[in-house]
Amino acid sequence: MKKGQVYEGMVQSVKFPNRGIVVVEDLEKTERAVVKNVITGQKIRFIVNKNRSGKAEGRLLEVLQKSTLEIESACKHFATCGGCQYQNLSYEEQLKLKEGQVRELLRDVICPAVEQESSASERDKFEDRFEGIKGSPVQFEYRNKMEFSFGDEVKGGALALGMHRRGSFYDIVSVKECQIVDEDYRRILSCALAYFNEKEVSFYHKMSHQGYLRHLLVRKAVKTREILIDIITTSQTPPDTICMEQGLISDFKNELCKLETTGKIIGILHTTNDSLSDTVKDDGTKILYGRDHFNEELLGLRFKITPFSFFQTNSLGAEVLYEIVREYVGNLGTTIGTNSGANSGSETNKQIIFDLYSGTGTIAQLLAPIAKKVIGVEIVEEAVLAARENAELNGLHNCEFIEGDVLKVLDEIEERPDFIVLDPPRDGIHPKALTKIIDYGVDKIVYISCKPTSLARDLEVFLMRGYHVERMCAVDMFPGTVHVETIVALHRKDT
């Protein structure tokens, strides 16, 4: 295949994350290319934009023939918005696809195909340990956080607020009818878009680094129904004198307070972000109304969540995930107690648990009742402060949360863990940090991953260093998208 040429082919399969394997047969020999945003069974037209060492990658131009698996998406923005990729599959098919992707990635690491008699037996053992995928309790309106971006749908067009256009770094699609959030999000988005369009306020341009509006962050708890809104702008004062910053933002706050919502707006914030990168960064936050956090409940525990602290974005799905974590920890040699902190640190609980990459301390607090002490390590200061408050709120006095990079903090902790829980960011664990974790020599480790390719890479190291996999499963926290969580219980071979 040649770069810049257009080809037609059939989508043979879809690998994680959303990498379609397209077979082209009308050449001198059958060739394959990787094309994103496709579904198994589609016939497509694509253009090759990269071909290195015989590995071609292409960009989808047109679906010539639909797959028999496809259905009509429930979201009117699906064809253009880059937020979701699998809403044209039934939920049953989404689960099959994600389960197959995770199974393949883990199987290739745990029992690589080798020409020996034991290979079939190893594959059977793998299937016994792989427990499939658990679905989300809800498939739509499940998110408790959205970061909407300001921009335009076409260069020089009207102000837009929503998600990036599929395949585009610059264009923004106004997702007024987004289906992975509930009606309150849609009303807040529409209110913000109408207000700032009327005021003719500029958005931040990524190339020139000029402009005012950047993001609208909305978070809403499923259990408490509390809503937190944060308008994120640069520090550049809007040029129009009738839109001076103080009055502009204050009036926007008043417009939000007039909205009729099913939840309760408990806080409206204004954050300044002058970072050159297209990320939400806090260079200073003012409270315009109410408070700077909202509360959510998971498995009987209460959590205070601030605008930028990590918390699973699917609250009901998180309960499924954490129940499995508790089960895996319990099946690694101890019995989980209740969620009450009354007996935390009692004489019968001798374990010291490390919760690495602990976020707002959710996992640490769920495991506190079985431990003598839980030590959480998290690099985001805001999340650590929230974790400490949450532990106090839940009456758990055997939790310690340390701010810092896991790689460095592990050298400073005097205690040694009895077992470790890992929940790293998408890129997985830094190789040097992974070595330090393994060098503790704990018998049991539970690894929670939001990116199975990173998990597969780290698992290779664990397996080489004497661990084996006891149990594993996937959890779909993000219906309609390519993302999937994976949980693996590891055990040292010599114990």
Image (cartoon, grey):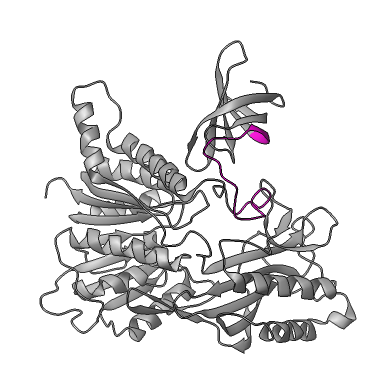
Which one is nearer the viewer's eye here, 153 or 45?
Answer: 45
Extreme residue toward the right, this view:
241
Q: Does any portion of residue 235 appear in the rendered image? A: yes
Compared with 235, 130 (above or below) is above
Does the magenta segment cover residue 79? yes
Residue at 19%, 69% (x, y): give it: 336
Which one is nearer the viewer's eye here, 379 or 28?
Answer: 28
Q: Is residue 25 left or right of residue 123?
A: right
Compared with 46, 444 (above or below) is below
Compared with 285, 69 (above or below) is above
Where in the figure is residue 223, as x and y percent of width and height? 44, 77
Where in the figure is residue 155, as x and y percent of width and height? 83, 53
Q: Which residues are magenta?
A: 59-83
Q: Main secondary structure of the magenta part?
A: loop
Residue at 18%, 82% (x, y): give it: 343
Residue 180 sits in which quadrant? bottom right
Residue at 26%, 64% (x, y): give it: 326
Residue at 27%, 56% (x, y): give it: 446
Where in the figure is residue 117, as x and y percent of width and height? 19, 22
